[in-house]
Amino acid sequence: MYSAIDMVLDKLEKQIKKNKQKIREYRTGSKNRTKRVSELEVEPVEEDIEKQVRIKNIDYKPMDVEEAVMQMELVNDSFLVFTNARTDKVNVLYRRKDGHYGLIQPSI
């Protein structure tokens, strides 16, 4: 029984180290992040499931929330990134599972 506990502790320790390393890599600048993404696509993943990261560059323009909702109704995307014309900050409007919309905006 003690050997099983030791094995579990070793496995948990490895997982914690792996997650801490991911957080460190994420906190380094976007320059390093794009480098890591390209490395992930090239290197084989240890797990059987391969994860692919699709990068999409978007242009966002200033508009009101109401105009953003109208844009979302016209397109079939699940989210829309725009600059709020009233606050001049980047906002994200997304379509929720219940059919309504959600708005993500910076608090500062």
Image (cartoon, rainbow, N blue to C red):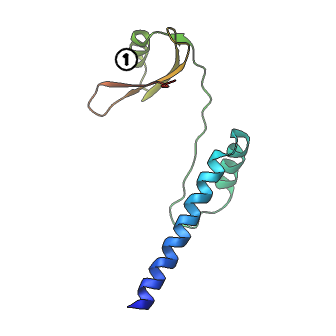
Residue drawn 53% across the image and 65% down it: 16
**Residue 17 picture location, percent across and down:** 58, 65
Dot 1: few (<14), some (14–19), or many (≥20) neighbours within 10 Å? Answer: few
Find numbered disc 1 in the image and state the secondary structure of the residue it sits on.
helix
Q: Where is residue 103, by image quadrant?
A: top left
Residue drawn 63% across the image and 63% down it: 44
**Residue 96 picture location, percent across and down:** 33, 31
**Residue 91 picture location, percent across and down:** 49, 22
Residue 81 to residue 63: above or below: below
Viewer-closest of 20 and 53: 20
Viewer-closest of 104 and 5: 5
Asked whether, in this view, residue 103 is left or right of residue 44, the answer is left
Q: How many marks?
A: 1
Residue 44 to residue 54: above or below: below
Identity, as a three-letter code, of the amino acid under mark 1: Glu
Residue that badge 1 annotates = 73
Viewer-closest of 24 and 67: 24
| Quarter of the image where the N terminus is located | bottom left
Residue drawn 52% across the image and 9% down it: 85
**Residue 95 picture location, percent across and down:** 36, 28
Q: Where is residue 70, by image quadrant?
A: top left
Residue drawn 39% across the image and 10% down it: 66
Q: Residue furthest front?
A: 108
